[in-house]
Amino acid sequence: MRATVMHGAGDVRIEDVPDAALAEPTDALVVVTRAAICGSDLWPYKSMEHDEAGRRMGHEFIGVVEAVGSEVRTVKAGDLVVAPFLYSDGTCVFCREGLHPSCLHGGRYGYDGVDGGQGEAIRVPQADGTLVVLPVGRDDALMPSLLTLTDVMGTGHHAALAAKVGPGKSVAVVGDGAVGLCGVIAAKRLGAERIIILGRHLDRIALAKEFGATDVVGERGDEAVERVRELTGGAGAHSVLECVGFEESTLTALGITRPGGAVGRVGVPQNDSIPAALPAFFNNVTIGGGPAPVRAYIEELLPDVLDGRIEPGRVFDRVGSIDEVPDGYRAMNERESIKVMIEF
Ligand SMILES: [Zn+2]
């Protein structure tokens, strides 16, 4: 079968790899119908050292179950399924608390002999705990929005929950990538009154406004902090979604949080320490977030996608075949594309 393999910074190839196959009785073999490139796939694309063996890529996919192991009960051959970006058993102490990223038997696609999602097929471990059956056909018009449930929509929702978004609150979203845009959707869905997006790419800002952003701040650094404070009566926002992970964006997020407010971090931190710890302390700012328990959120968000109440699939502005994956990485890395969907 063909799959995406990264060999180093800027070096993504489509290669023939061994066919995906069942290995454990808890596995499902899924033939991929849709996949996506994630902003987090761009970290190795920028920095990975050359590796001739390469690394299998992709953790956002929808597909049709082809076969299941002897212990799998909740999915069967022929089911169309969506998978969260991590696999999990659904039964351990952390899964039962809704914290699937900490699953005792969970893991990541593309590691430990597990296939990546940007390929023709994938072995999904812990199929019962991981996969969710979709009540639509494989080429349903909702496919782009359903595909965002694998990661970006659940991650934006997680940022909003960690930032304690609620009715009447003022919200600021730092980052205008796919996750930030989904954060806007999540904030509106949870009843936020004012949603300020910090970003400067015109196409992304336009989409953010359609998703419910009420104000746009194009400045950066101290100027951005000042502008958000102006917009919020000098106090800052109740809830701030940090969807980037850089030191500067984290500093901005903490600078625009109202005393007693909360920051929800979902951008993977690129630094060891959190800046501005002292003012955050004296302002009683809650700092939360982490990898989203997307498996828990699929069930919560799926009805809204099926009813058309939210349309996160609009973050996809480019669609291609598996042969176009390398150019998709390039386009996203150069900010030419917000997010790329792959059709099989
Ligand atoms: Zn678990």
Image: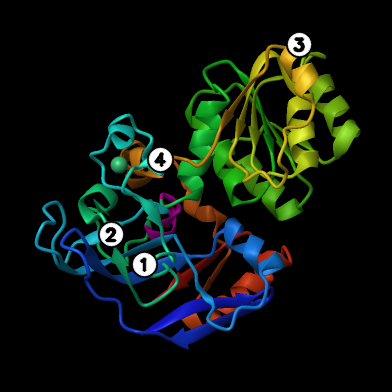
What residue is disc 3 on? 282
Whether residue 144 appears in magenta in the rendering, the answer is yes
Label 3, label 4: how many angstroms apart (C-alpha)?
31 Å
Which residue appears at 41% of the width and 49% of the height? 149
Q: Residue 117 sits in which quadrant?
A: bottom left
Q: Are marks 2 and 1 in contact (CB under 8 Å)?
A: yes
* Residue 182: x %, y % from top left: 55, 43
What residue is disc 1 on? 114
Q: Amino acid at mark 1?
A: Val
Label 2, label 1: how many angstroms apart (C-alpha)?
8 Å
Q: Which comes before the other along the chain, label 3 or label 4?
A: 4
Query: In what element is the residue under mark 1?
Result: loop
- Per the picture, the main secondary structure of the magenta-coloured stretch is helix
Q: Amino acid at mark 3?
A: Phe
Q: Amino acid at mark 4?
A: Ser
User: Which quadrant does ligand 1 occupy?
Assistant: top left
Q: Are marks 2 and 4 in contact (CB under 8 Å)?
A: no
Q: Residue 194 sits in which quadrant?
A: top right
Q: Which comes before the other along the chain, label 1 or label 3?
A: 1
What residue is disc 4 on? 102
User: Which numbered marker is on residue 125?
Assistant: 2
Q: Cβ(mark 4) to ligand 1 < 8 Å?
A: yes
User: Magenta residues, as a range?
Assistant: 143-149
Label 1, label 3: how many angstroms apart (C-alpha)?
45 Å
Q: Which comes before the other along the chain, label 2 or label 3?
A: 2
Which residue appears at 34% of the width and 38% of the height? 296
Question: In the image, 239: left or right of 312?
Answer: right
- Name the image quarter holding the C terminus: bottom left
Label 2, label 3: how many angstroms apart (C-alpha)?
45 Å
